Amino acid sequence: EDNDRIDFRAYVHDLLSQLLTSSPYGLVDLDIAQVEPTHIESEIAVPVGLILNEIATNAVKHAFNGADVRRFAVRFSDRGTDYLLEVSNTGTPVPDAIVLENASGLGLQLVTGLVHQLNGSIDLSRRPNTVFTIRFPKPAE
């Protein structure tokens, strides 16, 4: 009914469940239990969806090969003036040689570019599991 805002939890589930079931390394458990039931603006949902798609694709291609436990988790919360998105996986951590600010791969360049488009920030933790923490402001109403 409202094309300006979408159900974010349903969006994340629809986007990632298809992608993660196609992993050549076996079943990947998708955990979205900590995605707040909220509606977000469409202009935010599109770049966030592209970010999630790219991080999940990288996990499927690089992190889950040989992993005993394959879990991909998304946390999302509305913090009043901004949003917090955390994306993690239990696969092989992102190599130390990869630096987000100077990533040579097109995928991570896309992720950092989309985060900047959202006027946000991104942090990467590698151990014990890979965690991307992204913060970005809510659009003015």
Image (tube, rainbow, N blue to C red):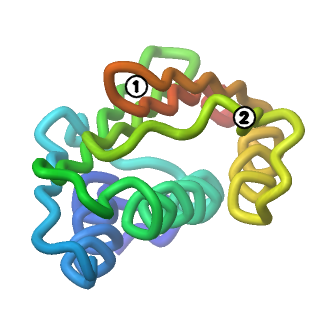
SS at mark 1?
strand
Q: Is residue 2 above or below residue 73?
A: below
Quadrant of res 136: top right
Quadrant of res 43: bottom right
Query: In screen coordinates, is 92 left or right of 94?
Result: left
For disc 2, the marked residue is 97
Q: Is residue 112 above or below residue 62?
A: above
Give the camera-side residue of 86 and 36. 86
The disc labelled 1 sits on which kind of residue?
Answer: Asp
x 58%, y 55%: residue: 51
For disc 1, the marked residue is 78
Label placed on residue 54: none
Total labels drawn: 2
Query: In screen coordinates, is 67 left or right of 128?
Result: left
Q: Earlier in the sequence, mark 1 or mark 2?
A: 1
Q: Quadrant of the N terminus?
A: bottom left
The disc labelled 2 sits on which kind of residue?
Answer: Ala
Residue 80 image position (x, y, % from top left): 47, 15
x 79%, y 65%: residue: 106
SS at mark 2?
loop
